[in-house]
Image (tube, rainbow, N blue to C red):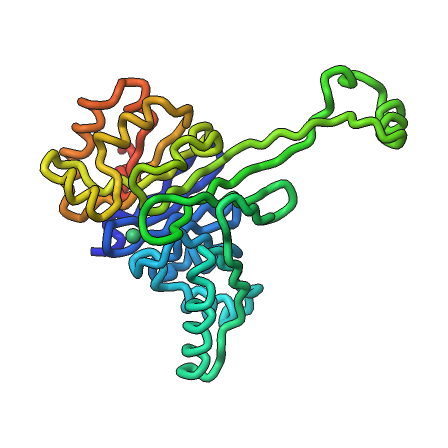
Amino acid sequence: MPGQFFRKIMIDSMEIIGYSVAGEESFVAIPSLDVCFDVGRAPDEAVSANHVLLSHGHMDHAAGVAYYCSQRDFREMAPGTVLLPDNLAPAVEELLNVWGQIDGNRPPANIIPMYPGQEYELRRNLFAYPFETNHSWKALGYTIIERRNKLKEEYLGLPGPEIVKLKNSGIPITYTINMPLVTYLGDTTSGDFENLACVQDSKILITECTFFEQDQHERARAGKHYHIDHLGKMLEKWNNEHIILTHLSRRTDMKIAKKMIKDTFSPELAKKVRFLMDRPRRSPA
Ligand SMILES: [Zn+2]
């Protein structure tokens, strides 16, 4: 039953809200970043986000895209912005046109075709960085990067007017740091993106893990999804502080999945891992 696996996760002050069951529905909303990764069937949490970042066109991830745009209009919100793999942009525009014919009102929307490596500025100092994953054709993952200019060490402690003087004289007094806050992989199996620093160093990694059973390696390969055995080996090498697993199959027994994490991951890695689709924990009595 939808909702049974609905989950909110708090990491520091960041709320992550989502629902993700393979073949059924997937969305992950992060209100403080004003993004929703994939749109599922366009729940309120997705509609509230100014930006939907679609990873690929499979129905369980993208079904609600027109409804998202329409609800934004109905609720007198700014038109929704949908970042998506470039090959999907004409079809989504056409989908909105068709809904315009059916409904009598074509929902306004900013449909932004994305290409691997081409950043999109979500707001000042905050960017969505898309990269190619390995699932359906041109499927994308996204890293949300916060970019800050820092004063170079040699100028720290200088009085304000001195700094302004240096800046006005054209001397570069700052350097730029990129902080990968969150990476969302969408659906994927192993691919070149596993070598990207923004993926390996992302503070929070949201990754699918569709298959857990030992007899499911072939199914994982065929459907281009991660199997826990491969994912675990990758995650052991990466530097993520928090790992959120999504897109489990409804048939996966959560108790077995949790036991596998405990038994096969190092203790350091195991304690970083959470399931998005876990049943909400009861608050302590
Ligand atoms: Zn898919």
Quadrant location of the N terminus?
bottom left
Foreground residue, 221 or 229? 221
Left or right: residue 84 compared with residue 23: right
154 vs 233, left or right, is right
| Res. 46 image quadrant | bottom left
**Residue under the point 44% across and 64% down:** 68
User: How far across and how far down the image is residue 237, in percent?
Assistant: 36, 22
Is residue 278 visible to the viewer in this orientation of the structure? no
- Position of 275 relative to 92 (above/below): above
Image quadrant containing the C terminus = top left
Residues 217 and 79: in front is 217
Q: Name which residue lies at 17% across and 36% down.
A: 212
User: Does residue 89 sit above or below 247 in this rendering?
Assistant: below
226 horizontally vs 75: left or right: left
Q: Position of residue 100 (x, y in %)?
A: 46, 80
Asked where in the image residue 41 lies, by quadrant, the reply is bottom left
In depth, the one of 151 and 44 nearer the eye is 151
The residue under the point 32% across, 27% down is: 234
Count the labels in the image. 0
Q: In the image, residue 135 lies at what x, y percent?
A: 31, 48
The answer to whether 230 is drawn above or below residue 80 in the figure is above
